[in-house]
Image (cartoon, rainbow, N blue to C red):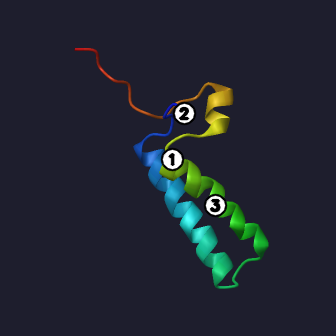
Amino acid sequence: MKVNVGGLDRTIRIIVGLVLIGLTLTGTIGVWGWLGVLPLATGLFRTCPAYTLLGMNTCPMKKNA
């Protein structure tokens, strides 16, 4: 799969995913918190299927030398 999730986007996804999972494990929020697995996975693997469908990319452009 092609990488399409950049640095800041990746960091935010990982943090949000971990927070949602943590809140679920502590019982603060219900089972919907397990949806935090999605942003966590897209942040760790650096690819987002929705970005692919929409033609988006938050990775910086590589310069040709």
Up-down: is 23 above or below 18? below
Residue 39 place in picture, x, y as percent:
60, 54
Up-down: is 57 above or below 34? above
Residue sitting farthest toward the left: 65
Q: Residue at x 68, y 77 (%)?
A: 24
- Side (left or right) of 26 relative to 2: right
Quadrant where the N terminus is found in the figure: top right
C-alpha span from label 1 to label 3: 12 Å
Residue sitting farthest toward the right: 31
Q: Which residue is mark 1?
A: 45
* Kind of residue at badge 2: Met
- Circle 3 Cα neighbour tier, 10 Å, few/some/many (<14 / 14–19 / ≥20): some
Residue 61 place in picture, x, y as percent:
38, 25
* Kind of residue at badge 1: Phe
- Side (left or right) of 31 relative to 5: right
Q: Are marks 2 and 1 in contact (CB under 8 Å)?
A: yes
Q: Residue at x 51, y 58 (%)?
A: 14
Q: Residue at x 48, y 34 (%)?
A: 3
Q: Are marks 2 and 3 in contact (CB under 8 Å)?
A: no
Q: Which residue is mark 3?
A: 37
Q: Which residue is mark 2?
A: 1
